[in-house]
Image (spheres, rainbow, N blue to C red):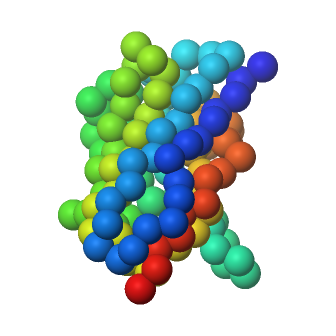
């Protein structure tokens, strides 16, 4: 059974940093794209960042470019999201996801990030 488990969320003040982690089990994702998405109440889930394979190309939403960094450790089947200079508008539930083929098929349960002003 494939599982993605996020951790590292919390409540911080604007300008602070957080590092989210996502540990995958049940399958190796070293050849797959992994990514982070976020969602706030009443809004659709939105893409935040993605990384292809090991040290592969990365992609970021414009809203987080220059502040967030996605990385992965294939030895530990883990993907990270370093979030710096957090803003109140970054408040959301953050989800880790992994692809099978070209589709994000596997999802974590989410971790709450709250940024106070």
- Residue beneath the point at 37% across and 24% down: 73
> Can you give x and y, in whole percent of width and height, for residue 48 in the image?
45, 60
* Residue 1 against residue 33 in the figure, above or below: above
**55 to the left or right of 2:** left
Q: Quadrant of residue 6?
A: top right
- Residue beneath the point at 72% across and 81% down: 42
Residue 33 visible from this viewpoint: yes
Farthest-out residue, left: 66
Farthest-out residue, bottom: 117
* Camera-side residue of 102 and 63: 63
> Can you give x and y, in whole percent of width and height, for residue 107 in the image?
67, 42
Q: In which quarter of the image is residue 117?
A: bottom left
Residue 102 visible from this viewpoint: no
- Residue beneath the point at 44% across and 68% down: 12
* Camera-side residue of 60 and 38: 38
> Can you give x and y, in whole percent of width and height, for residue 49 in the image?
41, 53
> Can you give x and y, in whole percent of width and height, for residue 101 in the image?
57, 31
Farthest-out residue, right: 1
Tally the numbered discs: 0
């Amino acid at each position: 059974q494939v599982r993605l488990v996020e951790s590292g969320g919390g409540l911080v003040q604007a300008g602070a940093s957080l590092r989210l982690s996502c540990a995958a089990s049940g399958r190796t994702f070293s050849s797959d794209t992994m990514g982070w998405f976020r969602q706030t109440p009443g809004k659709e889930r939105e893409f935040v960042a993605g990384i292809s394979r090991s040290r592969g190309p990365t992609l970021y939403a414009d809203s987080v470019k220059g502040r967030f960094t996605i990385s992965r450790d294939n030895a530990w089947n883990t993907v990270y999201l370093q979030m710096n200079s957090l803003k109140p508008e970054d408040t959301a539930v953050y989800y880790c996801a992994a692809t099978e083929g070209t589709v994000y098929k596997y999802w974590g349960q989410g971790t709450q990030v709250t940024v106070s002003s």
